[in-house]
Image (cartoon, rainbow, N blue to C red):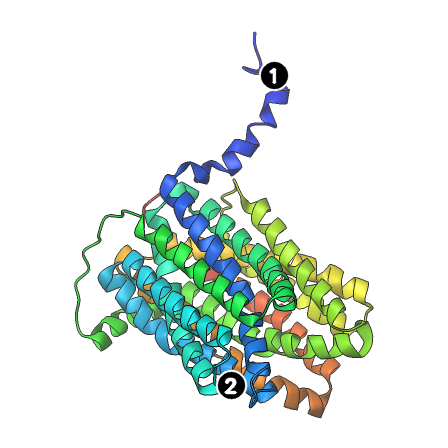
Amino acid sequence: MKLRTRPPAAAGPRKAPRRLRVLRHSRFRRFLVGQSTSLLGSGMSTIGATFAALQLPDGGVDAVGLVMAVRILAVLAMLLLGGVFADRLGARSVMLTADLLRFAAQGVLAVLLFTHSAQLWEIVALAAVLGIGEGGFSPGLTALVPGLVPAEDLADANSLLQIAQAVASVVGPGLAGVLVAVSDTGTVVAVDAVSYGVSALALAGLHLPRVATPCGRLFTDLGRGWKEFTSRTWLWVTTLHISLFNFVLWAPFLVLGPALAQQRLGGASSWGLVLALYGAGSVVGGLALLGRNPGRALAWSMAASAGWALPAAALAAGLPLAWVAAAAFPAGAGAAACNTLSTTVIQREIPAEVRGRISAFDSLGAFALGPLGLALAGPVSGAVGAGRLLAFGVMWQLTAVGAVLALPSVRRHGATPQLDGMR
C-alpha cells in the first residue's frame, strides 16, 4: 500500500511557485511594475523637495516645514473626495488622473529647479498640487486591487505591494542623496515626475469592467460612506487604534528619534541604520506573508501593531545603537503584517460600490492626528523629557493593543471561514 503519492522532497519546492502565484495575473503584474516605480520616485521626492527649499535665498528650516505641512494638509483634504470619485468614476480613472496631476506638478518643479528660477511660493503651490494627487490616488488603491486578482490571491497582492513600498522607502532616499551629490535637486524631482508617468502608463493599459454605482450629491455619498464605516465596529475601532498610535507613539518617535540619535547614538548615519533595518523588516514581513492566508486576519493585524513599540522602548530605555536598530527590524515586520492583513480584510468584506469611500475614511482617520503629534512632540518632550514621552507612548501602544484584541468584534472576526468572494 502506498502511503505517499510523491517523495517527501517534493513538498519543499512547491512552496515557491505558490508564494508567487499572484504574479500569474498579467493585470496585476502591470500594475505592480507601475506602482513600484511610482513608490521609488516618491521615496526620492521628499529629499528633493527638502533640499530645494533649503537652497532658496529665502529658504531654510521654516521653508521645509511649510512645504511638508502644505503637502500633508492637501493629502488629508483630498482623501474624502478621492474616495467619492473612486466609487463614482472607477478607481482606475481617478488614479490615472491623480498620476497625471503628480507628473505635471513634479515636471513643472523640475523645470523651475533646472532653470534656477524657483521661488518659495511656487514650491509650496506645487507641493499642494502633489498632495492633491496623492490624496486622490490613495483611496483608489484599496478599491482597485480586488479587480486585478481573485479573492484568494488578495493577501499575496497586498504583500507584494507592501514589499515594494518598503524597498522604495529604503532605496529611494539613498538614491536621491546620490543624485543630489552628483547632480542637483532638479534631477531628483525630474526622476520622480518620470516615475509618475510610468505609473500612469501602467494604469492606462489596464482594462477593467466598470462597476455601475448610483451617484447622488457629494454629501449624500459621503454620508452613505460614513454610515457604512461606522456600522462596522471592527473597522472604526481599528482605525481609531492606528490614529492614536500615530499621535501618541509614532509621531514622537519620528521627531525625537533623530535628535536622540544625534545626542548619543552617533548621528544621522546611525538613524539611517535604524530606518534601514525597519525597512528590511518590512520586506521580510511581506515575504513571510506570501502564500499564507491566516484565519482571524484582523486580530493578527492588530497583534502585529504591538511591534511598533519596540524601537521606541529601546530609545526610552537609553539602550545603545545595536539594540535600537535590532528593535526596528521586528517593528518593520509587524508594520508589514498589520498593513497587509488589515487592507485585505477591508477589500474582502467591504462592498465594491463603497470601497473607495471606506478606504478614504480609514486613511483619514488613521493619519489625521499625525501632524498634530509631530507639532506637539518637541514642546511636550521639553516639558516631561524625551524618555518619558516615548515610554508613555510604548505603554499606551501595548495597552491599546490588548484593549482592541479584547473586543469580540475584533478578536473573533474571521473565525468562521467564508467562501471566497462571499460578503
Residue visible at 60% across and 52% down in the picture: 283
Report x, y in % for residue 328: 69, 62
The residue mark sitting in front, 1 or 2, is 2
Identity, as a three-letter code, of the amino acid under mark 1: Pro
* Of the pair 229 and 415, the residue shown nearer to us: 229
Could you say whether the residue bearing mark 2 is in a helix, strand or loop?
helix
Label at residue 39 = none
* Of the pair 91 and 285, the residue shown nearer to us: 91
Tell me: 84 left or right of 316: left
Q: Is residue 263 above or below residue 325?
A: below
Please state, as top left, top right, bottom left or bottom right, where the N terminus lies in the image: top right
Please say whether residue 1 is visible from this viewpoint. yes
Could you say whether the residue bearing mark 1 is in a helix, strand or loop?
loop
User: Residue under circle 1?
Assistant: 7
**3D distance between C-alphas at marks 1 and 2:** 64 Å
User: Residue under circle 2?
Assistant: 66
Identity, as a three-letter code, of the amino acid under mark 2: Leu
Residue visible at 53% across and 43% down in the picture: 290
Q: Residues within 10 Å of mark 2 (few under 14, many from 20)?
A: some
Q: Is residue 417 above or below residue 105?
A: above
Residue visible at 53% across and 57% down in the picture: 165
Report x, y in % for residue 66: 51, 85
Please say whether residue 304 is visible from this viewpoint. no
